[in-house]
Image (cartoon, helix red, strand yellow):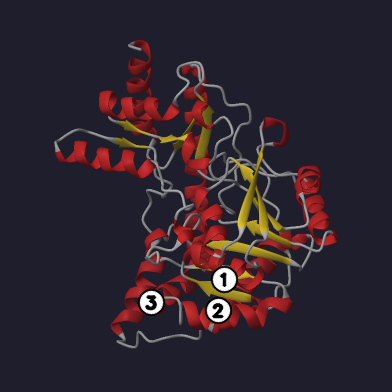
């Protein structure tokens, strides 16, 4: 009999943390107090101006399709944002508003990747990225990385692993799960290397803005021949609105527009009108206050985890994650995470969600909850360790 389920879905990995989250919800339903440090979602609500802009638009009743590439005024605002923040002149025609960063990845890969072609990524990395490649019948070559390269791909690693089937390389900076940045000169060299090899460079910049040292460099600072994926979810706090953007090289504009027309029709118009307010000066000032709060949380959690005996070879400079080595306590981080949840009601993400390289010795802690709640979580974690 003909297979009914597509073979491409066989290699798409599940989120292992969803099993943990399901159990956490069950425990909460039983009255248990669960401290959530497993989900990569800011605990702040969307800024008030964004909410009000959305409500104002919805109340007009004119919630209609926009052009597939997005509201022209929003694309222009994004272009102005790049001029102001990075000193870059990005033509609005190269900017596509998408249903979240996930939609941006689908457009970027759909416009550039052929079946059988390969994309280089770091291990550990965000798991959906590999699955997006799989969806287009491509393959992923994950390159083990460690503290020596700040858990990032480098130009040297790209050259070493490049082969005749390689189409491109993806770098996420700041990264999920490690929160690390690739140094500016390393990013520049990586972009130049991929361009020289005739490949596509994909830059995941969705955590830009949530950086606690120098500003993260955009791949666009070094070449126009790059795909840049960004989102309103993380820095702007608009996770459930499902809106992001993609910047493409000139030669991919027509292909990306055709794909957007057919795959999405358009990104939600109320989310787009809401996002117009994201770049207001008052909104950006509020987001800066939140960035400073995340930095304080990072500092607290970093010191607390070190104090408990976890190893953190590279202090994260961005996003809202710490990727900690728990090998002092276990050789099975998934089991450790499940037992911690059951015993103490603290939910964290096991390393196996992000790859295979030393994954059994790693846990990701998200500091998307208050310092007070994290302090309670650290007390529970200490008690759990003491009883093992």
Residue 217: horizontal and vertical position, in percent? 71, 53
Cβ atoms at labels 2 and 3 below 8 Å apart: no
Out of 149 and 212, give the one closest to the viewer: 149
Question: The residue tagged with tag 2: helix, strand or loop?
Answer: helix
Q: Are marks 2 and 1 in contact (CB under 8 Å)?
A: yes
As drawn, 315 above or below 14? above
Query: How many other residues sit within 10 Å of disc 2, few (<14), some (14-19) or many (≥20)?
Result: some
Quadrant of image for the N terminus: bottom left
The Cα–Cα distance between marks 3 and 1, rounded to whole angstroms, is: 21 Å
* Residue 347 in the image, given as x and y percentages of width and height: 34, 34
- Pointer 2 residue: 259
Q: Which residue is mark 1?
A: 107
Q: What residue does disc 3 label?
A: 270
Q: CA distance from mark 2 to mark 1?
A: 7 Å
Does residue 97 sit above or below 351 in this rendering?
below
Report whether residue 155 is seen: yes
Q: Residue 386 lies in what quarter of the image?
A: top left
């Amino acid at each position: 009999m003909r297979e009914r389920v597509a073979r491409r879905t066989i290699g798409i990995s599940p989120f292992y943390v969803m099993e943990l989250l399901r159990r956490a919800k069950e425990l909460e339903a039983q009255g248990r107090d669960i401290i959530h440090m497993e989900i990569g979602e800011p605990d702040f609500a969307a800024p008030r101006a964004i909410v009000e802009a959305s409500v104002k638009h919805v109340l007009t009743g004119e919630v209609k399709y926009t052009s597939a590439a997005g509201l022209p005024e929003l694309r222009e605002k994004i272009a102005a944002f790049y001029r102001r923040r990075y000193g870059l002149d990005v033509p609005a025609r190269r900017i596509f508003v998408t249903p979240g960063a996930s939609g941006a990845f689908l457009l970027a890969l759909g416009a550039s990747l052929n079946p059988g072609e390969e994309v280089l990524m770091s291990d550990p990395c965000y798991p959906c990225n590999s699955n997006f490649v799989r969806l287009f019948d491509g393959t992923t070559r994950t390159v083990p990385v460690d503290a020596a390269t700040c858990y990032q791909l480098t130009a040297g690693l790209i050259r070493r692993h490049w082969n005749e089937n390689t189409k491109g390389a993806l770098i996420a900076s700041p990264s999920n799960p490690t929160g690390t940045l690739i140094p500016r000169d390393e990013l520049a060299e990586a972009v130049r290397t991929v361009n020289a090899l005739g490949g596509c460079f994909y830059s995941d910049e969705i955590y830009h803005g949530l950086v606690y040292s120098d500003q993260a460099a955009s791949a666009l600072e070094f070449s126009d021949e790059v795909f840049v994926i960004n989102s309103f979810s993380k820095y702007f706090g608009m996770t459930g609105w499902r809106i992001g953007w993609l910047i493409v090289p000139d030669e991919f504009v027509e292909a990306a527009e055709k794909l957007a027309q057919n795959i999405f029709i358009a990104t939600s118009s109320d989310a787009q009108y809401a996002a117009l307010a994201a770049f207001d000066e008052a909104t950006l000032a509020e987001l800066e206050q939140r960035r400073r709060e995340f930095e304080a949380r990072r500092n607290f959690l970093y010191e607390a985890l070190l104090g408990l005996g976890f190893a953190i070879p590279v202090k994260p400079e961005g996003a809202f994650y710490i990727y900690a080595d728990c090998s002092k306590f276990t050789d099975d981080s998934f089991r450790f995470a499940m037992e911690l949840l059951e015993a103490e009601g603290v939910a964290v993400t096991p390393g196996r969600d992000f790859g295979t390289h030393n994954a059994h010795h790693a846990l990701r802690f998200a500091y998307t909850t208050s310092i007070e709640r994290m302090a309670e979580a650290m007390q529970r974690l200490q008690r759990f360790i003491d009883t093992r």
